[in-house]
Image: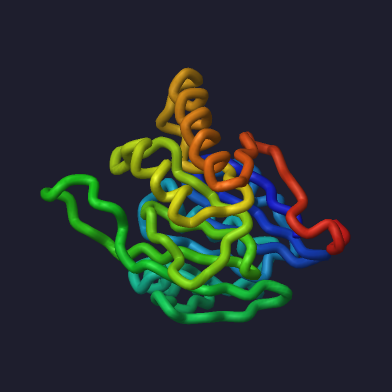
Amino acid sequence: MRIAKLEQSCLVLEIGDSTLVIDPGSETSGAEALRGVVAVVVTHEHADHWSAAQLESIRSSNPDLVLFSTERVVQAASQLDPPVAGRVVRAGEIAEVGPFSLRFFGGTHALIHKTIELIDNVAVLVNDELYSAGDSLTVPEGATVSTLAVPIGAPWLRIGDAMDFVEQVRPKRTIPVHELTLSAMGRAYSNARITESVTRVGGEHVELGVGGSLTLFPEHPN
């Protein structure tokens, strides 16, 4: 399995000719060029994780894709013309689509402020390998995670909490996501702290930038 990083929290996973896209938001570029997309997972409704225009651009070349998301996102996608087929998913559910196995966790966005509505947020574990928690630090209880997507910059995030998240999950590797709010100095600082934490649990931090990729399962040809 190959993973590629696009802007903010967008990750593109490929196994053979099949592609899975996670959180293609309004800041994501290049998603319209993706082919073989069998599914899109949207963790929650915020625009930096999904937009109707972005989903339609992906669907234009992949008409049979299926959306997995929260109730509000699936409902909005059902009102597009033509509607996008969607399934509402919640913590504890499992789905199979093409070569991808999806396990869902969590349920709620991290608290930004007491005056701001708490919305639904689902975290996803793909093929028992890659874990992306959206805008949350939900630990996937009972699961072993090899590759953890770690948010490193957000209005709701304290870097110490992200470090604790890494040490609780204990992955083999971490990759940074949710970094567009940070300056170059901020990214360097946050990546250094995540490196410290994952090293303490015997893993490594891969500073995957936009356009970068890595192979998670070499036995799958890309």
Q: Is residue 125 left or right of residue 3?
A: left
The color scheme shown is rainbow
Residue sitting nearer the eye, 144 or 45: 144
Residue reaching furthest left?
A: 115
182 w.r.t. 142: above or below: above
Q: Quadrant of the C terminus?
A: bottom right
123 w.r.t. 186: above or below: below
Where is residue 57? Give x, y as percent. 59, 55
Q: Quadrant of the N terminus?
A: bottom right
Residue sitting nearer the eye, 208 or 85: 208
Where is residue 145? Give x, y as percent. 57, 61
Residue 140 visible within the image: yes
Q: Is residue 14 left or right of residue 69?
A: right
- Identify the residue at horizontal 31%, vertical 57% (top origin): 109
Residue sitting nearer the eye, 145 or 101: 145
Residue 82 visible within the image: no
- Identify the residue at horizontal 17%, vertical 50% (top origin): 116
Where is residue 16? Give x, y as percent. 82, 65
25 w.r.t. 19: above or below: above
Instruction: Tell how many labels.
Output: 0
- Identify the residue at horizontal 38%, vertical 70% (top origin): 70
Q: Is residue 33 left or right of residue 85?
A: right
- Identify the residue at horizontal 51%, vertical 34% (top origin): 196
Where is residue 50? Give x, y as percent. 46, 54
Residue reaching furthest top?
A: 185
